[in-house]
């Protein structure tokens, strides 16, 4: 009986404090004139050079809640979609999030997220933040 109580308490505690995460991927085809990439992203950015002539961004979103419902909701609305913009300078591509990430309540708890961006950039493109 003691083992059963310990097992129930363990499952309750690990279930309560577990986190959920999702990864989404986006590709951006480049104009041959683009020389610089500026990332204006909220989170950690990991840069990887490759030989493709496009940019791929793999965004991993981690939530403090164990339920994936809030992440699915925010991702479904496009809250984590990146928007490319070349209007600032002709030879520069700027990547930003579509909008500020809203506060999402799941069963009365605020969902807090952290983003990690893995950005694959052509070798010919210079990256700044």
Image: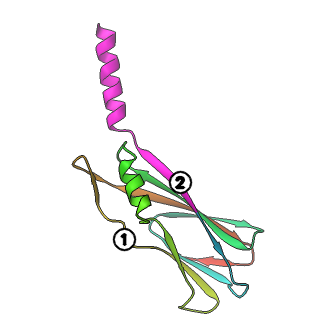
Instruction: Tell whether position 20 is magenta.
Output: yes
**Where is mark 2, residue-wise?**
23
Q: Position of residue 59 (x, y in %)?
A: 53, 60
Q: Position of residue 115 (x, y in %)?
A: 46, 59
The single residue placed furthest to the right in the displayed view is 51
Q: Position of residue 94 (x, y in %)?
A: 55, 81
Image mark count: 2
Q: Which quarter of the rendering shows the N terminus?
A: top left
The single residue placed furthest to the left in the displayed view is 108
Q: Residue at x 21, y 48 (%)?
A: 108
Magenta residues (range): 1-25
Q: Residue at x 51, y 59 (%)?
A: 116
Q: Position of residue 8 (x, y in %)?
A: 31, 20
Where 115 sits versus 94, above or below?
A: above
**Where is mark 1, residue-wise?**
100
Is 109 or 74 nearer to us in this picture? 74
Sequence-wise, which precedes: disc 1 or disc 2?
2
């Amino acid at each position: 009986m003691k083992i059963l109580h310990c097992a129930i308490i363990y499952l309750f505690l690990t279930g309560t404090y577990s986190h959920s995460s999702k990864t989404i991927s986006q590709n951006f085809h480049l104009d041959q004139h683009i020389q610089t990439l500026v990332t204006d992203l909220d989170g950690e950015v990991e840069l990887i050079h490759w030989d493709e002539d496009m940019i791929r961004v793999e965004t991993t979103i981690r939530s403090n809640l164990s339920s994936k419902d809030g992440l699915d909701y925010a991702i479904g609305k496009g809250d984590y979609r990146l928007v490319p913009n070349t209007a600032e300078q002709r030879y520069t591509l700027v990547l930003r999030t579509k909008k500020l990430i809203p506060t999402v309540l799941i069963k009365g708890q605020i969902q807090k997220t952290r983003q990690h961006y893995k950005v694959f950039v052509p070798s010919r493109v210079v990256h700044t933040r």
